Image: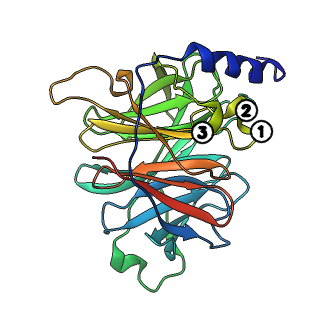
Amino acid sequence: MNNVLKPIALIISLFLLIGSPITNAQTTITKIGEITDKKIPEASGIAASLRQENVFWLINDSGNNESVFAVNGRGERIGRIKVKGIKNRDWEDLASFEYQGTPYLLIADVGDNKAKRKKYRLHFIKEPTAAELTGQDKLSLKPDWTLKFTYEDGPRDCESVAVDMANEKIILLSKRDEPPVFYELPLKKTPKKQTAIAKRIAELQPLTVNPNDIHDIKFLAFGDRPTAMDISADGKSGVILNYLNAYHFKKSENESKFLFDTWPVKFNYPPLRQAEAACLDKNGNIIITSEGLPAPILKINID
């Protein structure tokens, strides 16, 4: 769509979405910490540690080195992994999950603003233990494996990647399509020379945006674009983030439909410079942070 028309299209969509079944929630949103570390200037992905209580992993966007950082809930850096043998072409999301009894981190090198990349890569590293991080400024690790892939219908820009362990799938959500599109890949180790094909599975339902939430003119056209995603270990709940709001999705116990086909609850979080990182903690609460320094770490309490 022409960039001049995008703001008009968004304004029209705001009026069309009046009466949407999406629920606006009132809850406690707490600033639990703040990132001030100059080595983490552009947090584009966050994931909750599966090995340590109240610890989160972070990556930087493109233009930064190939490191994954561990911070405590206050935002203080407590460890760093230098990932060997790969490049940060455009790291856009991070996920934590357990595979065959081992905690892993998935680094999603999937950004593609101009939709011109021939291949995308997902790197899988084993999450270090607290003992392995203690006293080390930089722990070096190689990916346990890397999944190269393309999309079945051509290149896509993507900033939202999650692991659906309940179905052993990797879920991707495009950013610039109208509407954004979900794709899936199988969660399994693949041969180095093999290129997987991400299959289109659904479109993202319209997510309501209130004009009053637009605190910066730069978000007028792209404020509703998805920038992060996460799915709980049991596959029953998930979060999608955009520049203005967070959306919590939840399935009932026996519901079999695709998680993101359910209607979400919308949370308005305080204005952030460029919110591109979100995850669920072990209690199912939403954790959010932003690119730029200082970057608040926010927790949205989910009942």
Residue located beneath label 1 in the image: 217
Real-space CA distance between mark 1 and mark 3, rounded to the nearest whole angstrom: 26 Å
Question: Is residue 45 positioned above or below 32 on the image?
Answer: above
Question: Is residue 209 positioned above or below 216 on the image?
Answer: above
Q: Earlier in the sequence, mark 1 or mark 3?
A: 3
User: What type is the residue that disc 3 sits on?
Assistant: Val
Asked if residue 11 can be seen in this view, the reply is yes
- Residue that appears at 63% across and 27% down: 156
User: What type is the residue that disc 1 sits on?
Assistant: Ile
Real-space CA distance between mark 2 and mark 1, rounded to the nearest whole angstrom: 5 Å
Q: Position of residue 258 (x, y in %)?
A: 33, 22
Q: Is residue 123 left or right of residue 258?
A: right
Q: Could you say whether the residue bearing mark 3 is in a helix, strand or loop?
A: loop
Q: Earlier in the sequence, mark 2 or mark 3?
A: 3
Residue located beneath label 3 in the image: 110
- Residue that appears at 48% across and 19% down: 205
Q: Position of residue 148 (x, y in %)?
A: 53, 37
User: What type is the residue that disc 2 sits on?
Assistant: Leu
Q: Mark 2 touching mark 1, by CB under 8 A?
A: yes
Q: Position of residue 41 (x, y in %)?
A: 67, 63
Residue closer to the observer: 119 or 36: 36
Q: Is residue 154 left or right of residue 184?
A: right
Q: Which label number is shown at residue 179?
A: none
Residue located beneath label 2 in the image: 220
Q: Is residue 271 left or right of residue 267?
A: right
Q: Position of residue 32 (x, y in %)?
A: 45, 66
Real-space CA distance between mark 2 and mark 3, rounded to the nearest whole angstrom: 24 Å
Q: Quadrant of residue 134?
A: bottom left
Task: Report crowding for label 2: few under 14, some 14 to 19, many 20 or more residues within 10 A (C-alpha).
Answer: some
Q: Mark 1 touching mark 3, by CB under 8 A?
A: no
Residue closer to the observer: 43 or 285: 285
- Residue that appears at 53% across and 40% down: 245
